[in-house]
Image (cartoon, rainbow, N blue to C red):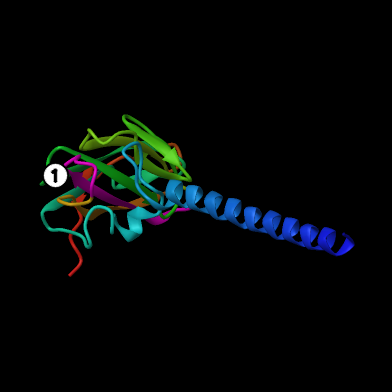
């Protein structure tokens, strides 16, 4: 009986270890799905630089334009409003991810802040607004965006995406001068060859 009791304990430990490994694997799968795939209520941060592949097409597409618009010359520390617009086919809906090379992003109309980046709240919009708080250090900064045009069929087939960016110069305020906010423009991204 003592021998069979030892064997049972070893099997019990093996089952416990197996269940632990299974639980860890399932947890990793759930977390990676939450962070590895875009959802209709917001993209995964980091896509502004890497794009929307493979979920919305294998590569950036010239059929989609992503335009980031707003002030291009701003004073250190000031908060300004920017817009990202996605155009092109398909036209049923869209999504975006925006990152900044400095300063701080803040959500606006139909956007949310996720891990320091701006993403969409739903897949029905094609234009989104957000704010950017300019850094306290003068210099050149980039607002980078990836936007997708989706057909909302629940699959990646037929969707397309592209990049857009806007260069912003942050300047010191002149003593006694009103804060300059000028050069409002839009910049269109282009597909990589």
Q: Which residue occupies the foreground of this view, 76 or 90? A: 90
Q: Position of residue 91 (x, y in %)?
A: 12, 40
Can see residue 164? Answer: yes
Queried whether the magenta region covers residue 182, the answer comes back as no
Q: Residue at x 15, y 37 (%)?
A: 92
Q: Is residue 187 above or below residue 58?
A: above
* Residue matched to label 1: 87
Q: Which residue occupies the foreground of this view, 180 or 35? A: 35
Q: Main secondary structure of the magenta part?
A: strand
State which region is magenta: 136-155
Q: Position of residue 71 (x, y in %)?
A: 28, 42
Q: Is residue 123 left or right of residue 139?
A: left
Q: Quadrant of residue 105?
A: top left
Q: Is residue 29 left or right of residue 130?
A: right
Give SS at disc 1: strand
Queried whether the magenta region covers residue 149, the answer comes back as yes
Q: Is residue 113 above or below residue 163?
A: above
Q: Residue at x 32, y 29 (%)?
A: 109
Q: Position of residue 20 (x, y in %)?
A: 65, 54
Total tally of numbered discs in the picture: 1
Can see residue 178? Answer: no
Q: Residue at x 80, y 58 (%)?
A: 9
Q: Quadrant of the N terminus?
A: bottom right
């Amino acid at each position: 009986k003592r021998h069979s009791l030892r064997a049972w304990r070893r099997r019990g430990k093996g089952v416990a270890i197996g269940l632990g490994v299974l639980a860890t694997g399932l947890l990793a799968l759930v977390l990676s799905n939450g962070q590895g795939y875009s959802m209709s209520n917001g993209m995964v941060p980091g896509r502004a630089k890497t794009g929307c592949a493979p979920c919305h097409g294998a590569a950036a597409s010239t059929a989609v334009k992503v335009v980031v618009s707003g002030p291009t010359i701003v004073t250190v520390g000031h908060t300004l409003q920017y817009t990202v617009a996605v155009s092109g086919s398909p036209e049923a809906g869209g999504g975006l991810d925006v990152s900044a090379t400095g300063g701080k992003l803040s959500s606006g109309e139909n956007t949310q802040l996720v891990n320091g980046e701006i993403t969409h709240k739903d897949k029905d919009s094609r234009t989104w607004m957000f704010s950017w708080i300019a850094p306290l250090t003068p210099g050149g900064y980039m607002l980078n965006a990836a936007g997708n045009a989706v057909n909302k069929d629940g699959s990646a087939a037929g969707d397309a995406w592209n990049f857009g960016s806007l260069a912003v110069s942050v300047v010191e305020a002149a003593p006694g001068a009103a804060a300059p906010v000028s050069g409002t423009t839009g910049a269109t991204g282009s597909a990589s060859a």
